[in-house]
Image (cartoon, grey):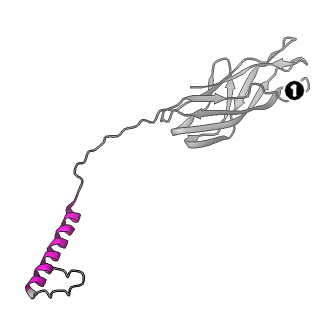
Amino acid sequence: MGAQLGQPAVPRSRENTLKLRASLILGTATAGLLVVTAGPAMAADTATTFELTGGGLALSAPATAPLTNAPAGTLTITGSLGEAAVTDSRGGTVAWTASAASTAFTGVLGSSSTAVSYTAGVVAETGTITVADGIATTLTATPASVVAPTTLSGNNTASWTSTLAVTMPAGALADDYSGTVTTSVL
């Protein structure tokens, strides 16, 4: 027992001191055991899922592209069609192919081109994709492959600046010529 206010403390016996020490040691050990072995009163797992959704496949190309003017008698007219780009947001591994087709280039006075050639040039890539640089491809009204990846995975883009070469017959008249190049992707 502790001393009352104003009264001297009563000395404890050796037996009481040992009991008090034993109680403190036992209490501390019990509290430590509770801390070490205490776990959640209840636990529950939550199964969690998500989906990565794919987007689309898009192509951009200039609406117009003037070729280089040349004097009458020039057999091959060349020029840039500008930059074309394929953006693949599907997030998969299915390849795509960019194709091009062309009408003949005709003038008001009746002359017409004899051939049209398309060269994709150097292909710039982003994402996980490998595309060979373009080679000259003869275009007709039927679409022909001009750029196609050899490997791809996930979202990616490929862009290139193509060159068009229009072959004219030797007797082509001085005139304004026009034609349409259609670029597509599948």
- Magenta span dominant secondary structure: helix
> In the image, residue 181 lies at what x, y percent?
72, 22
Q: Secondary structure at mark 1?
A: loop
The residue lying toward the viewer, choosing from 83 and 52, is 52
The answer to whether residue 169 is magenta is: no
Q: Quickly name the residue at label 1.
A: 74
Label 1 crowd bin: few (<14), some (14–19), many (20+), radius 10 Å: some
Q: Find the residue positioned furthest to the front.
A: 6
Q: Quadrant of residue 58?
A: top right
Q: Find the residue positioned furthest to the left.
A: 15
Q: Which residue is depicted at the point 80% across and 31% down?
A: 79
Q: Is 71 situated above or below 49?
A: above
Q: Quadrant of residue 147?
A: top right
Magenta part of the protein: which range?
A: 15-38
The answer to whether residue 27 is magenta is: yes
The residue lying toward the viewer, choosing from 185 and 101, is 185
Could you tell me the amino acid type at mark 1? Answer: Thr
What quarter of the picture does the C terminus occupy?
Answer: top right
Q: Which residue is depicted at the point 72% across and 17% down?
A: 103
Q: Which residue is depicted at the point 81% across and 19% down?
A: 178
